[in-house]
Amino acid sequence: MKKDECKISTAMEDYLRIIFVFECKGFKPSVTSIAKELNVKKPTVTHAFKVLKKAGYVDYTPYGDVKLTERGRKIAENITATHDLLLKFFNIILGVSLKESEREACLVEHCLSKETVEKLTFFVKEYLSKKNS
């Protein structure tokens, strides 16, 4: 994170990640679809979009589309990569159920240092390459 960027809350990171996931799947994220995915009310999503827009993470117009800005996309990509890494670690390596792995990856993805993510990435890649050879 650059010195001039503010750390955003884990909830706001969740919104960025789910917008990113929707975009990657070719869906246009909407207030309704995000509310359903995150199990929150539509006004909560609208408020989050306004906060994220003000911070420069999304482009959003009420009753319109929401899109990640370049700044928002960088955060979303990092959070998503960390989420996917943790999901593999919990589910494939530790043998935790997929449902529980998903839940716990969502909880942990926000609080790991860059160093920890790098070392965990190395460990998972090494483990999986040995397992597949």
Image: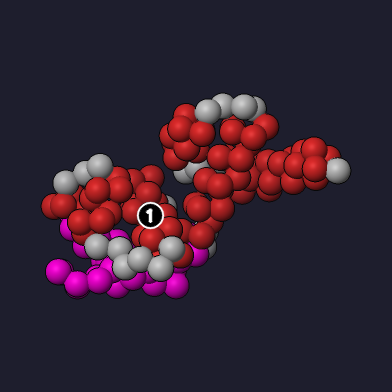
Residue displayed at 21% across by 44% down = 40
Closest to the observer, 100 or 69: 100
Q: Position of residue 2 (x, y in %)?
A: 51, 62
Q: Position of residue 94 (x, y in %)?
A: 64, 27
> Tag 1: residue type?
Ile
Specify the farthest residue to the right: 133
Give the residue at mark 1. 18
The stretch drawn in magenta includes residue 51:
yes
Residue displayed at 50% across by 42% down = 109
Rendering quarter of residue 68: bottom left
Give the structural element (helix, strand or loop) at label 1. Answer: helix
Residue 78 seen by the camera: yes
Q: Where is residue 120 in the image (x, y as percent from the top left)?
A: 68, 41
Q: Circle 1: is it few (<14), some (14-19), or many (20+) Cα within 10 Å?
A: some
Would you say 53 lies left or right of 129 here? left
Start and end of the magenta stretch?
46-75
